[in-house]
Every structure is written in C-alpha cells, then in structure tokens.
Amino acid sequence: MGNRSAERVLLFLKARQSSVCAVDCDILPSKQRKTPRASKARALPAVKAGRNTPEKGEGLLGPAVHVLMRTRNEDGLTFAAHAEVLGRRGSVLFGKMGKPLGTPLVAMLNSQIARGATTFLYLTTRIRWNGPYVTEACKLRHVYQSFPPGMRELVPSYYLNEADRIGTWFEVVEMTRLTKEEMNRIFVISSGREIMSVIKSSATLFKVSVRPTPK
C-alpha cells in the first residue's frame, strides 16, 4: 500500500473513532457479545429511580434544550446493560467518547436541571440494519465534564476501563422508550427540522427541543 493510501486509511479510522460514544456496543468485550440475544423489536420497560416526577405539563418531552445522540444498541445489550445498573443503583452513567460536549452546553443543561426543568439525553438507535429507529428518553440528574469520583459503580462493567478516555458523562435517573409520535415532535434547534428527517446524516449528536403536543 502506498504512503497516500495508508494515510487515508489512518484518517478514516481516526474520524470513525471520534464519532463513537461509550454506549456504542463496538467496545463490548467478546464475552459479553455472547450474551443470549434479546428480542430486537421489544421495547425496554420504563426504569425509574425513586419519585422523579417531571414538572407538570412536561412529561417525557420537556420544552427545555436537550441532547440527542445516535448510537448503536447491538442485540439490545447497550440499553439493557445501563438499565440493569439503573435498576440496582438508582442512577447510571452514560459516557460519550470522542469530542466532549462544549462547556457552554454542559452549563446550560446543568442550569436547567438546577431550576427543576426536566432535561433529557435522547438515545436513538436503529433496530437491525434496515429496521425502524427507536429512542430512549433518559432523564438527567447531572452532566459531568470528567469522570465523577466515587461513582464507578454506576458505570456498566463492559466499558469501565475506558473511563479515562471519556470527556462527557450523563447521570441518568430514568429511561423510557418514546412512541413514534413523541419522536416526531423532537426537532433540531439550529435548523428547526424534525430529528427523524436528519437522523441518517453524518452527525451523531444534536442539540434539540420538542414541539408542543398538538391540540
């Protein structure tokens, strides 16, 4: 292979790595990949920690600014692993590899949470390579810009050893699968377009909000 071809391959691999988040099952160890397959089309039940009731009128799609990440959920293992920790510990940490969230966005999300505004990390994935997209609404307690001390037990074991490479951590206290109608109300703030119309783009992270329920 010539020098130019080798350089192109290296650039491609670096670009691919920067878009991978820790909730992507690419980093699942081989032993965990052998876990018996769950039904791919079956939605996870809502997993809640305590009485974290959203503000009146907000439900699962609050009017605040939220973050949506497109990820992969190989055989349902990624969501299931985090839901299991959430059920045992009352909260769970989702890590984002690659480029971290900017400080202004993290500050905005934490400010909303401190005011009592229900704030979400939406995780969107596709069921099989040609199946429908589904979204988990993950209610946030806090967003961290480095690994929070004393919280290792809140990270699924399959990527705990990757913690030093992760620059953004989302502490989640509730996970709920959205309906198709709820997904269609999410829109990208920068363009105003519905998220489902741009979800196939090269971007993997979006700053989003939600349109009011039609009357």
Image (cartoon, grey):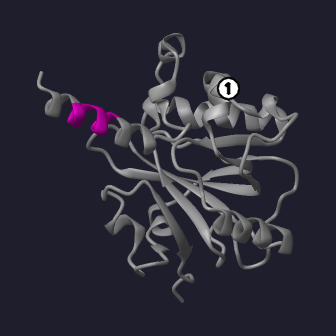
Side (left or right) of 163 relative to 99: right
Side (left or right) of 13 relative to 106: left
Q: Quadrant of residue 88?
A: top right
> Is 11 part of what is drawn in magenta?
yes
- Residue carrying label 1: 160
Side (left or right) of 205 relative to 1: right
The total number of labels drawn is 1
Q: In this orientation, which residue lies closer to the viewer: 198 or 52?
A: 198
Q: Residue at x 50, y 33 (%)?
A: 76
Q: Secondary structure at mark 1?
A: helix
- The correct choice, above or below, for 55 with respect to 67 in the image is below
Quadrant where the image shows the C terminus: bottom right
Residue 91: x and y in percent read: 79, 43
- Specify the principal SS of the magenta part: helix
Q: Quadrant of residue 23?
A: top right
Residue 82: x and y in percent read: 66, 35
Crowding near the residue tagged with mark 1, few <14, some 14–19, many ≥20 C-alpha atoms within 10 Å: some
- The correct choice, above or below, for 27 with respect to 106 in the image is above
The extreme front residue here reads: 3
Q: Residue at x 69, y 63 (%)?
A: 106
Residue 205: x and y in percent read: 48, 57
Quadrant where the image shows the N terminus: top left
- The correct choice, above or below, for 22 with respect to 162 in the image is below
Residue 162: x and y in percent read: 62, 28
Magenta-drawn segment: 7-13
Q: Is residue 161 visible?
A: yes
Q: Residue at x 47, y 37 (%)?
A: 73
Q: Which amino acid, by three-letter code, is at mark 1?
A: Leu
Side (left or right) of 73 relative to 53: left
> Is 140 part of what is drawn in magenta?
no
Q: Residue at x 16, y 28 (%)?
A: 3
